Image (tube, coloured by chain):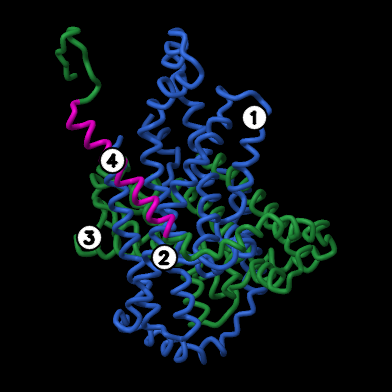
Chain colours: A green, B blue
């Protein structure tokens, strides 16, 4: 801690002058970035619309109540589709993620090249949002549930494989050694030494990702990939606000139930 | 004695013990899963013949993504990316500025019950809907452009950041807080000297993480009109310029990858 000597005697400061200046400089740069960013955004904003927003919000709010309860019967099929997209997408993801995770884990990968390739699969799957995957797949496969399911699957591979390979790297090696001591082949070592140790993780990750996927699949319909988002998009475009509020309520309930189910299952596994 | 032991038959084969021990539950789960899959695939209306017919068309679409065309719309793509970056930065800052009071209010050990409940309500409300649905409404209210995306991302940030801040405050070390209180500190001094130093390292890490998330999300709010690189991407798709779309995707992936690397490094450095 630096000391300062003056005519009053010895006193102390928290930081040296140089460090203090550096911190101020950091703040200056940060604040100027924020001001600059704000200017750029405000240039592209029509402020009249922003001023008008509270009135618009009140207007839409009034139009959204009461929710059109009778519309629920038409939403059963879309909700079922949404759940299917999430569930089957998660299954596809897990089926692909398990081998990828074994290639990516340091202790099970056959060669460094496989590890790099697997890590690349994981990162590229994680960096593209499921909505963008869906946007692409709708162009390639045509609109519908299949595009949504594959989009969810592709997006989830990276997430599941990442958590799995970390779990594989953290296994208890003495068990694998014990299996090895019986003269087991590599495949047997993986099957009897490693898989039993990571099986609870696989199940836990699958359920966790399924919960996230339910949320994500509710919006895939916005780009035409099936599910309840299709109805949401249609209702918003036709300004049917009572239907919109009903759909939002249904989404809310679905997400709530899926969260509860996933918490229960994870609790039972662990 | 020898003949006695030989009478006991030990199993000659070993089987792996099953993951789910109760056989009834195991079979119930397997049967349930099979019935569900049957119903799910039944309702998906997969037309195999059409699917096979569509493969060459899909391949043609897929081929038109390659090679990515960085040259034709360089200016537009660059503008979109910059807009996304600024949008991510400013919505992270605004979101965090708003989450600090809400997070303080949502910590049970700081706030009285009615403040706690109302703050928790705000958090739950902003966490319920994904950013993209928030963005749809923001576009309806504020018009097209990055301002709508900024509002949507800020609200999303509140739900994320305030919740984690509140949880961190609830798990803090009470002794330090008590020690500061014993010196006769006012409420603000108490917050500033007892609580802020305890939660700060984790919060800095989380804000970098949230910046990362906001950039990713800024790439999709554009699809519904919220500005940023997503709007550029959507335009490219709508104009069937798949090679430009591929270039945008490559750029997004590269930025997200490097952001993830940087944020991971920064978080390690802070903690």
Q: CA distance from mark 4 to mark 2?
A: 24 Å
Q: Nearer the viewer, residue A70 or B105?
A: B105
Q: Is residue B204 above or below residue A2?
A: below
SS for tag 4? helix
Determine the chain carrying the residue at label 1: B
Q: CA distance from mark 3 to mark 2?
A: 28 Å
Main secondary structure of the magenta stretch: helix
Q: Quadrant of the N terminus of chain A?
A: top left
Q: CA distance from mark 2 to mark 1?
A: 39 Å
Identify the mark at residue B268; answer none if there is no mark. 4
Q: Which is in the foreground here, disc 3 or disc 4? A: 4
- Badge 3 crowding class, 10 Å Cα cut-off, few under 14, some 14 to 19, many 20 or more, is few
Relative to residue B63, is residue B145 drawn left or right?
Answer: right
Q: Is residue A87 visible?
A: no
Q: Which is in the foreground here, disc 2 or disc 1? A: 1
Relative to residue A177, is residue A194 drawn left or right?
Answer: right
Q: Is residue B229 visible?
A: yes
Q: Residue at x 37, y 64 (%)?
A: B82
């Amino acid at each position: 801690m630096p000391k300062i000597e003056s005519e009053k005697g010895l006193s102390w400061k928290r930081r040296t002058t140089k460090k203090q200046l550096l911190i101020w400089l950091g703040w200056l740069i940060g604040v100027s970035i924020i001001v600059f960013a704000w200017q750029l955004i405000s240039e592209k904003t029509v402020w009249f619309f922003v001023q008008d927003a509270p009135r618009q919000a009140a207007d839409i709010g009034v139009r959204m109540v009461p929710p059109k309860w009778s519309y629920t019967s038409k939403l059963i099929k879309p909700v079922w589709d949404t759940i299917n997209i999430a569930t089957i997408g998660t299954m596809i993801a897990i089926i692909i993620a398990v081998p990828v995770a074994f290639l990516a884990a340091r202790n099970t990968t056959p060669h460094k090249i496989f590890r790099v390739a697997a890590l690349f699969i994981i990162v590229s799957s994680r960096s593209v949002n499921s909505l963008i995957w869906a946007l692409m797949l709708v162009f390639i496969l045509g609109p519908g549930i299949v595009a949504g399911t594959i989009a969810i699957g592709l997006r989830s591979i990276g997430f599941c494989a990442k958590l799995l390979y970390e779990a594989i790297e953290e296994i208890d090696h003495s068990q694998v050694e014990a299996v090895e001591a019986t003269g087991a082949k590599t495949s047997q070592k993986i099957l009897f030494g490693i898989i039993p140790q990571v099986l609870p993780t696989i199940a836990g990750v699958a359920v966790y990702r399924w919960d996230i996927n339910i949320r994500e699949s509710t919006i895939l319909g916005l780009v035409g990939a099936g599910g309840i988002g299709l109805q949401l998009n249609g209702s918003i475009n036709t300004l049917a606000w009572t239907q919109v509020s009903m759909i939002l309520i249904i989404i809310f309930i679905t997400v709530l139930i899926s969260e509860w189910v996933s918490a229960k299952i994870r609790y039972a596994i662990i | 004695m020898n003949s006695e032991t030989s009478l006991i038959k030990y199993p000659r084969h070993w089987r792996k013990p099953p993951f789910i021990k109760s056989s009834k539950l195991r079979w119930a789960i397997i049967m349930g899963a099979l019935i569900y899959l049957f119903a799910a695939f039944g309702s998906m209306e997969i037309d195999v013949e059409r699917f096979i017919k569509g493969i060459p068309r899909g391949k043609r679409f897929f081929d038109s993504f390659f090679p990515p065309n960085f040259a034709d719309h360089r200016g537009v793509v660059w503008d979109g990316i910059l807009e996304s970056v600024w949008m991510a930065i400013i919505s992270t800052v605004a979101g965090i500025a708003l989450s600090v009071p809400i997070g303080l209010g949502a910590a049970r050990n700081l706030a009285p019950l009615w403040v706690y409940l109302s703050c928790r309500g705000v958090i739950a409300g902003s966490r319920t809907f994904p950013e993209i649905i928030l963005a749809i409404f923001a576009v309806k209210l504020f018009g097209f452009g990055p301002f709508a995306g900024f509002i949507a991302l800020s609200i999303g940030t509140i739900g994320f950041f305030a919740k984690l801040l509140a949880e961190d405050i609830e798990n803090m070390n009470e002794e330090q807080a008590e020690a500061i209180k014993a010196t006769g500190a006012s409420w603000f001094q108490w917050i500033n000297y007892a609580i802020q130093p305890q939660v700060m390292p984790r919060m800095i890490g989380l804000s970098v993480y949230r910046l990362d998330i906001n950039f990713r999300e800024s790439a999709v709010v554009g699809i519904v009109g919220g500005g940023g690189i997503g709007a550029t991407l959507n335009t490219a798709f709508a104009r069937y310029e798949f090679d430009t779309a591929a270039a945008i995707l490559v750029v997004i992936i590269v930025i997200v990858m490097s952001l993830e690397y940087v944020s991971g490094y920064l978080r390690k450095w802070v903690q």
